[in-house]
Image (tube, rainbow, N blue to C red):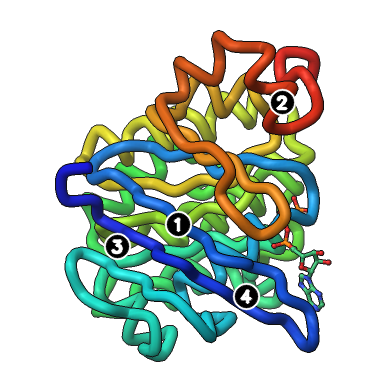
Amino acid sequence: MADPILTLSGVKTNIAQYHILQGVDLDVPRGQVTMLLGRNGVGKTTTLRSVIGLWRAHEGTILFDGEDITRRPTPAIARMGIGFVPEDMGIFSDLTVEENMTLAAVSGPVDSARLDWLFSVFPPLKTFWKGYAGTLSGGQKQMLCIARAMIEERKLYLIDEPTKGLAPAIISTMARALRELKAQGASILLVEQNFAVARALGDGAAVMDDGRIIWAGAMRELATDKDLQERLMGLSLEAS
Ligand SMILES: Nc1ncnc2c1ncn2[C@@H]1O[C@H](COP(=O)(O)OP(=O)(O)OP(=O)(O)O)[C@@H](O)[C@H]1O
């Protein structure tokens, strides 16, 4: 692949005594949306957390934009241009939406043009700007979580199950936001269980099983091949 933005080679990550990642090889192309798929518990979240340094890979290498980030501390990795949206959202309930967003802008004051763009994609953030994040609905909290990662331009976004438990209208809002992010030139690695969303947004897909990538290719190839889906994930994604 020509010059991927992120490359994992033979990444092994242990959590306590468990060998969770058992040699992950993955290329994330520049300017594309790559879907990380697979059954529950196969290591998708652990892969994202290993990239950003919240778990430490004990073997293998992780290259971001040509630089080895395998042993760098998380803040240094983030500063190089990686935004991370964790599955548990990680917002501050006791702070306002404004305070949550301001804290997320680590390199200086919030850029007003970027904020206007985020308000246009996530209108409730403008409506509840002075409200406490803890009082937002589940969907609004997820918008805030993603908007925090987007408040500054990043080269790569790692996003863990952004549509989990959300209503269809909010899923559409999320999808639009991610499309706009990609249109701005960002690369995205997205864990997504909702295959309709994965198919609509993904350029490429990588499927994990048991701590390894067992298939990688074009999303359209996976989306049109039910046998492949069943073989890779043991179920028809069309049905999910
Ligand atoms: N803090 C932890 N302590 C012990 N085991 C953990 C911990 N976090 C994750 N694991 C285990 O690591 C394995 C991979 O988990 P991970 O969250 O990466 O999977 P996943 O593919 O993202 O699954 P899901 O779709 O359910 O989030 C699972 O067996 C899980 O139980």
Tell me: 75 left or right of 44. Answer: left
Residue 34 lies, in percent from the top left, at 43, 39
Marks 3 and 2, the one that precedes in the sequence: 3
Secondary structure beneath dot 3 equals loop
The kind of residue on which mark 4 rests is Leu
Q: Which residue is mark 4?
A: 95
Q: Nearer the viewer, mark 1 or mark 3?
A: 1
The kind of residue on which mark 1 rests is Asp
Q: Do the residues bearing badges 1 and 3 touch, measured as CB atoms within 8 Å?
A: no
Residue plotted at (41% across, 43% down): 119
Secondary structure beneath dot 4 equals loop
Residue 199 lies, in percent from the top left, at 53, 21
Q: Which image quadrant: the N terminus?
A: top left
Q: Nearer the viewer, mark 4 or mark 3?
A: 3
Q: Which image quadrant: the C terminus?
A: top right
The kind of residue on which mark 3 rests is Glu
Marks 2 and 1, the one that precedes in the sequence: 1
Q: Which residue is mark 3?
A: 152
Marks 1 and 4, the one that precedes in the sequence: 1
Q: Which residue is mark 2?
A: 231
Q: CA distance from mark 2 to mark 1?
A: 20 Å
Residue 123 seen in the current view: no
Residue 86 lies, in percent from the top left, at 60, 63
Residue 215 against residue 238 in the figure, above or below:
below
Residue plotted at (32% across, 40% down): 181
Q: CA distance from mark 2 to mark 4?
A: 46 Å
Q: Which image quarter: residue 60?
A: bottom left
